[in-house]
Each structure stands twice: as structure tokens, then as C-alpha cells.
Image (cartoon, rainbow, N blue to C red):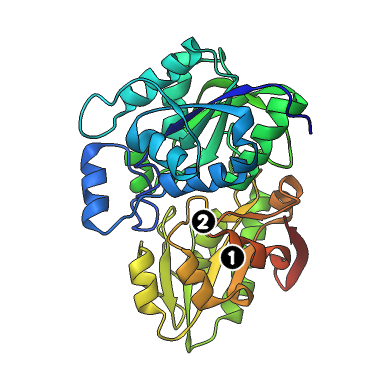
Amino acid sequence: MTFNVMKKLGLIVNPVAGMGGRVGLKGTDGEEVLKKALAMGAKPVAPWRAAEMLKKLAPVKNRITLVTCPREMGENEARGAGFGPEVIGSITSGKTTAEDTKRAALDMAKVGVDLIAVVGGDGTMRDVYDEIKNEVPVLGVPAGVKVHSAAFSTSPEAAAETVMKFLWEELPLKEAEVMDVDEEAYRSGRLSAKLYGFVLTPYEPTLIQGMKVASLEAEVEVEQQSAIAKHVVEMMEPKTIYFLGPGTTTSAVAAALGGEKTLLGVDVVKNKKITVRDVNEKEILRQLNEDGVVIVSPIGGQGFILGRGNQQFSPDVLRRVGKENVWVLATPQKLSLTPTLRVDTGDPDLDKEFKGYIRVTTGYRETHVVKIA
């Protein structure tokens, strides 16, 4: 890799992105939701996700002019990682807003950055898109609860690698979908996603996630989900507590138990009955006074089994449960669209522990061994 040319990298951090995840609020769009998340003990996610990316970029910091926003929108993390950033713009009030993100994107376009790294979720990416469209290449650093857009890296570490490859090895650009969901509908259990447009993103398929692919509603898919559910129910032990993650396949498990699942939340099952619905990280840890099993299904097209839409399964929860007690469910059709699985728990060491292979239930007494990249 040749570093003989100084490059200009923009950095925008949405400091409240992702705070609703572990507390089970499925997002932090809107002031009232943010207040509720804080009252429930939510902690900032985006700042340390930004710091993880910058830590990986530190060896080339003398070859990058880092252009960022004041204080919590990037300056704090940049200085903490040893960068001497060029700070532009302002934060209009004591707390950041979507308007601050939009203005920052415009300011960075005007000063001619080569690439803008956006630390947040779909809502943050949408704010950037609203202002600059495809005028400047953009790379998302995943920090939100919902990350359906195809402009995001698979992790902060992958973002740093993509930045370096793009700035000095001239990775090609591709148009990547910018998606967002209606958070109010999302919190009530309805997934309503919309395509807002396309941004230019460095193309490196091993480091950039794809767009979320919706679950099929074909009769054969429903039948296979039911077969998976029958197998899972037969495997359940009386003295074990089970945590059903979001998704239509896990919802089939709830149906096989005679109940109705919180589609986009985490529900608790004991003695083959749903005992608590839509729990957060704190409640999961409270329930884990017995053997526990986490049951998840990959996000279609992206492959994430942990870290996207199910942040209630935090590193603390997953360490208590153990990799061997994470059950993955997927129909053959979903696996054909998602040949490689991924995790992005927010703990790089834990992510490494999950890498390798895991057994995926694909039907009644049918399993496939699938790689976790």
C-alpha cells in the first residue's frame, strides 16, 4: 500500500445512534425516545465505534487530513485517537440534531474531502444523503440499531480497512442503497422499510454489507419455517430458559408453542411457554439465573446473526450463555442468499470467538454447518 499522497477524510459521528438497542427501544429517532433510552440506562454506542475505527487508522494518521465536527460529533474521538483534526462547522445547540449532521455533510463536501465516514445508523445515513446525494463518496460505520442500508461496513475495523484501501488503492465506487424504517411502526412490531436513494460507496464486498433482503412469504418458506420450529420445540429442555430473537423464523417457533411472538423484539420462553415479552439486556441478564439459550436467525442478504436489530443480546449476555448455546435458524432459501454468517457484537474479542463454523437448523432434524466470517 502506497501512502505518498495526503488524503482528506471526513468524519461525522451521531453520538446518540444505537442507544436504544440494548434497552430494547429499537432506535433513538426523536427526542422523547432518546429521553426514555437515557432513563433506562442506555449508554452511548457511536463514540466508541468511531474510536475503534480511528484506532485502526492511527498508523496512517500522518497521511490523512481528518476533517470532522466539533466535540461529540467527531472531534473528541479524533483527538482521543491521536489525530490533530481540522474541525469545521458548529453544533447549533447543547445537543446534536439531524440538522447538524446535514450541515456537516454539506460543509465537508465544500472543503473537498475524498470520503466521508458516517458513524451511525440508517437515519444518520439518510440525513447525509438528503444533503449531498452522490456528490461525495460515503462509508457508513455501523452504530445504529437498524442498519439496513448497503452503504455500511461490516464493522468499525472493516471500515478502517476500507478507508485505507479506497484512499490509496483506488477501490471502485458503487451505488449503494440508503434505506430507513419507520421507527414508530418498528417499535410496534411492523417493519416498514423504504428505499430513499443511492450514495456512492467504496466497493469491497468482503468488508461492506449488502442491503437487507426481506423474508420470503412463499408457501414453501412458511412450511420450512414450521418444520424448523417443530424441531426447535422438540429440543427444548424444561430447566433451560430460551430467548427468541427477532424475525419470522423465530416467530414460527412461538407459533409452534401456541403463542405469538414480538416480531422485532426478544421474548423469553420457559417450560415451552412465552413468559415475558419484548425484553431488554437488563431483563435478559436478570433471567439468566439458569441455563440459557439464545435463538436467532440471520438477516437475509447481510448474514448478521448478532449485532443488527438484536443488540439486547449484548456481549455480557453472550458470554453468560456461551457460543455453544446460540442456536441459529434459517430456511434453505435464506441460506442460499446468505452463504456466510457474520457477527458484530460491539466487542472485537468476542467477535473473534464466534468466527469459525456454527451449526444452523434448516428443517426438521436437518442442519447445515455454515461459516461465520
On screen, residue 81 versus residue 6, left or right, reads left
Type of residue at label 1?
Leu
The quadrant of the picture occupied by the C terminus is bottom right
Q: Where does residue 288 sit, x and y in percent of width and height?
A: 41, 80
- Is residue 333 placed above or below 148 in the rendered structure? below
On screen, residue 231 versus residue 252, left or right, reads right
Q: Where does residue 13 sit, x and y in percent of width and height?
A: 42, 35
In front of the other: 127 or 268: 127
The residue tagged 2 is: 346
Q: Secondary structure at mark 1?
A: helix
Give me the residue at 44% from left, 54% from top: 263
On screen, residue 134 versus residue 286, left or right, reads right
Give me the residue at 64% from left, 36% from top: 60
On screen, residue 260 versus residue 302, left or right, reads left
Give me the residue at 46% from left, 38% from top: 78
Q: How many marks?
A: 2
Q: Where does residue 225 sit, x and y in percent of width and height?
A: 62, 59
In front of the other: 349 or 358: 349
In front of the other: 68 or 239: 68
Q: Where does residue 302 sit, x and y in percent of width and height?
A: 64, 45
Q: Dot 2: few (<14), some (14–19), or many (≥20) neighbours within 10 Å?
A: many
- Is residue 140 placed above or below 361 in the rendered structure? above
The residue tagged 1 is: 350
| Location of residue 70 by image quarter | top left
Type of residue at label 2?
Gly
